[in-house]
Each structure stands twice: as C-alpha cells, then as structure tokens.
Image (spheres, grey):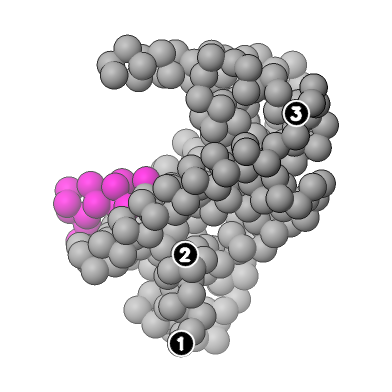
Amino acid sequence: MRDLVVRYLKLLGAFFSNSLTRDMEFKANFIGLMLVDLVYYGSHLLFFTIIFGYVESLGEFTKADVMAFLVVTFLMDTIYMFALAGNLGKLNRMIVKGDLDFVLLKPVNSQFFISFRYFNTYAMVSLVILTILLWLTAGNTGREIDLLNILLFIFSFGLGLGIFFSVDFIIASLAFWFKNFSVGGWLTHEVLKFSSRPDTIYMGWLRKTLFSVIPMALVSSVPTRMLIFGPSWTYLGIQIIVAGCFLIAARIVWLKGLTLYESASS
C-alpha cells in the first residue's frame, strides 16, 4: 500500500513538473489567466457589496461573513482549477476521437490519470493571494476563531472539494452515454454557480435539493460555517455522507462508462 501511494505521489509530481514547463513557455498567457481570475473575483465582491447596500445580512451571514465566504469559494474554485479542471474538459473529445485508448493502455488507474494529468500552474499565485485574503476576511468577522475551527474548516474544505470534483466528474462522464456531449462544460458551469452563494439564500425544495441531489450548497458554505461559526456537527455529518456517496457514484459511473466505450481500434 505504501509503495502504491509513493508511486502515485511521484506520478503527481511528474504531472506538475511537466505542466509547469508547459505553462512557462507561454508567459503572456500565464499572466493573462491570472488577471482574468482577479477580474472574476473582483466582480463577485462588487456584486455582494452592492447587495449589502440594501440589506444588513443574508440570514446568519453578515457582510463580513459573506466576504469570508466568497474568499472560501474563490479558494475552492482556484484549487479545483489548479489541479482538476484542465483535465475533465478534455474527456468528451478523448471519447469521441478514441484517444482514451492511450490512457487505458497505461499501467496506472485510468480515473486517476484522467483527473490529474494536467495542472493549471498559473493558479499558484492566486492560491497564495487568496490564502492571505482568507486570513484577513475571517479575522474581520469579529468572531473567535480557534484551532478547532481551523481544523474542521480544513477537513470540511476537503470534503467540499470532493463533492465539487464528483459532480463535475459525473457530468463529464455522461459523454460515454451521449456521444459528443459538448454541453458538459456549460452544464457543469451552471450547476457549480449554486456553490458561489451562501446556503442561507436557498429555501424550501431548492435548499433540500442543493443539500442532497445536487449538493452544491455543501461545497463552500459548510467549510465557511466551520471556520467562522464553529463546529456544526449536523452540517458536517451531512457533508461527510454526501461526499462519500458522490465519490462512490463517480467511481461507479466511470466504470460503467468504460463498458460502453468504443475503442478506436474496434
């Protein structure tokens, strides 16, 4: 088991090194993508700043809480962009053209290879900036944040990332059933929008749906709650169960999809 873990960690290191070399060959593009991220973050902050010109809070979330929530959302999105987003978008083309053959022939777990082959290394700068911003915005809430809050936040953040990945992976894998599933990227983008709003704005059946069937309300809101409100074992318990179910579902969908895949050599 240990040798297997070491092997895959070395493989991740090789993927990262190759991606960094690739990205640094196009420095202008590298800088341009970072600027796009900054504009994206700024537009969301401006949007909520305007909203709080008319209201004092969104449920339990004050303006300072929402600012911290937004940084958590940006951090989640940036880590995902850094490690995963550059891969699943290529799956549809690989299935249609038969390029998936080259992955399946490699002596490595195909789902792992598909998920982590390319890194968007430009996102590293954003990760540093957002980590500093999270420290500042969380401190600005005026709430007491102790070590337990931080540890639960890190754990919950990992679960949120797992849900984020699973939903995206399941949508991307629909290309096995719907050939040339070009709307997959758009569908993922629309679904993930629900994670960029505090869960307190969702009510009734929509709230229940976003905590279970399409669990995007669990991605960023629960980690933020762990950080600024402290332990909430109900929210964390729901997140653990949903993350486990969706990670298993992603694996099942992948294995089932492979049985439907038509090799280019067939």
Residue in the picture at 74% in, 16% down: 25
Res. 85 in view: no
Residue 189 percent location from the top left of the image: 67, 57
Res. 151 in view: yes
Residue in the picture at 57% in, 44% down: 256
User: What segment is highlighted magenta in the picture?
Assistant: 142-158
Give the residue at the far front of this rendering: 266
Q: What type is the residue that disc 2 sits on?
A: Pro
Q: What type is the residue that disc 1 sits on?
A: Gly
First along the sequence among labels 3 and 2: 2
First along the sequence among labels 1 and 2: 1
First along the sequence among labels 1 and 3: 1
Q: What element carries label 3?
A: loop
Q: Residue 263 carries which label?
A: 3
**Disc 1 and disc 3: Cα gap in Å?**
45 Å
Residue 22 falls in which quadrant of the image?
top right
Residue 264 or 158: which is nearer the viewer? 264
Q: Find disc 1 in the rendering and name its residue.
A: 204
Residue 57 percent location from the top left of the image: 42, 81
**Disc 1 and disc 2: Cα gap in Å?**
14 Å
Q: Find disc 2 in the rendering and name its residue.
A: 215
Query: Depth-wise, is mark 1 or mark 3 nearer the camera?
Result: 3
Does 151 appear in magenta? yes
**Disc 3 and disc 2: Cα gap in Å?**
33 Å
237 over 28 or under it: above or below: below
Residue 148 percent location from the top left of the image: 17, 51
Q: Residue 218 carries which label?
A: none
Q: What type is the residue that disc 3 sits on?
A: Ser
Q: Residues within 10 Å of mark 1 (few under 14, many from 20)?
A: few
- Identify the image quadrant of the N terminus: top left
Does 144 appear in magenta? yes
